[in-house]
Amino acid sequence: MPERREAVGGTLVVGGGFAGAYVARLLGKRGATIVNPDNFMLYTPLLPEAAAGTLEPRHVVVPLRQMCPHAELLLGRVLERDPDARTVVADTLGGTYEIGYERLVVALGAVTRTFPVPGLAEHGRGFKDVADAIALRNHLLRSLESAAARLDPKEAAHDLGFVFVGAGYAGVEALAELYDLAHEAVRRSYPTLRGVPQRWVLVDAAPRILSEIPRKLGEYTHRYLEKRGVEIRVGTTLESFDGDETVLSDGTRVPARTLVWAAGVRPSPDLARLVVPLDERGRVTVDPTLQVTGTSDVWALGDCAAVPNTRTPDRFDPPTCQHALRQARRLAKNLKGPPRPYGYRMLGQVATLGRYRGIAELPGLRLRGFLGWFVARTYHLYALPTFRRKMRVVADWTVALFFRRDIVELSALGRPHELGP
């Protein structure tokens, strides 16, 4: 039998993403035990800027030990749960433990949603975490180096073909930031590539891009990206990708050696280990107080849960950081006192579209261009937890105003040299 330990303060939080980390933080001195594979929380909205080199990748993550100073952190994963005994078995860096709890908070988040498209798993690239962002940046810079070394212009053009599938926030912002990086790098450092055409294509099955935001802002984004030379294919899906050519459902063939998949998420498959009720989409079902249906000691929130919202009774909350934060605030209060229903109406939405361009929707106000970009950055700085991280991000942004983006490619970081005899 695994060695037994008790959750700090009686609360066990499974998952240290935006939702879980904020619950543990807001519980304050009551404390909690967090089980999470990493010792940090990723602030996802800043991931595109980390991929483009505007921000240092370490600065878009927040150490959980600093964010939640009264919580115990165990790096690992939950293997199983015994609802009757109120325990879970967790495989951690320090060993396998049976952890007893009085209250269990499920915040496992989501993983990338994929489809059985020929070649996607073998050749496509995800964009979900810091590792994906770093790998994509390295790949883009290596593509520039490869193109610069080609003697055949057609082969060079293949290296400079980039297809992004998914026109939500992640896909649009990632494309815009990396587009800026590639064009700035070619203009300043790759003179032999200035005459080689770059091809950037944005693909989505929906009838328009950024369908989550007001139509006028989405249309502005569409026009802005097309003006910059981005091809936008809406109402279109990916048929296949062989690592050298992308085939779309409308018959278009795009010579490209880079395909980025940002077409949505699905709840974490680890939910199956926790013996909790799931809906048809694999999300944990909860009541308006965020308590898991049919339980008295389990709560769930964030991207892994189907969270009803009393302010928008016709639909569940979307998987965004903004909603996860508000859910965490309500749940922390419910765990500390009399439970109340969760209700939140969005105060606005923001997105950046590369350097000095963005969009923002505020109550009674819609901004675009430089003002939209400024508001988007201001909001992200406000929402980013801990003063230390805010200052590091401000420092990165300030440096980026005066200096060129770094174009060092560090693919070898994941392959350190072994010590020889």
Image (tube, rainbow, N blue to C red):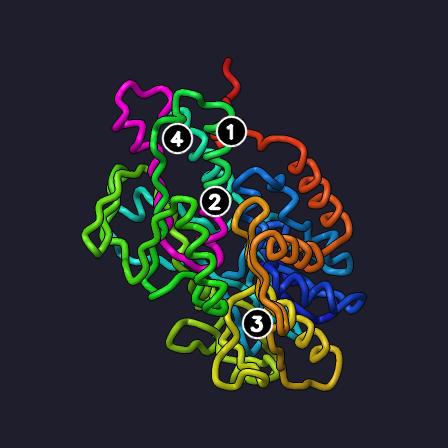
Mark nearer the N terminus (2 vs 4): 2
Picture quarter with the N terminus: bottom right
Give me the C-alpha separation between circle 3 and circle 1. Answer: 36 Å
Q: Which residue is mark 3?
A: 301
Give me the C-alpha separation between circle 2 and circle 3. Answer: 25 Å
Which residues make up the magenta segment? 147-175
Local SS, label 1: loop
Name which residue type carries label 4.
Ser
Q: Which residue is mark 2?
A: 132
Which one is in front in this view, the residue at disc 3 or the one at disc 4? 4
Mark 2 near mark 4, Cβ–Cβ under 8 Å?
Answer: no
Q: Residue at x 71, y 71 (%)?
A: 10
Q: Residue at x 76, y 48 (%)?
A: 388
Mark nearer the N terminus (4 vs 1): 4
Mark nearer the N terminus (3 vs 4): 4
Query: x and y percent of residue 119 in the render?
Result: 26, 46
Instruction: In the displayed orientation, state which residue is furthest to the right.
Output: 29
Local SS, label 3: loop
Mark nearer the N terminus (3 vs 1): 3
Give me the C-alpha separation between circle 3 and circle 4. Answer: 40 Å
Name which residue type carries label 2.
Asp
Q: Which numbered dot is residue 410?
A: 1
Mark 4: few, some, or many residues within 10 Å (few <14, many ≥20)? many
Q: Is residue 265 above or below residue 86?
A: above
Name which residue type carries label 3.
Leu
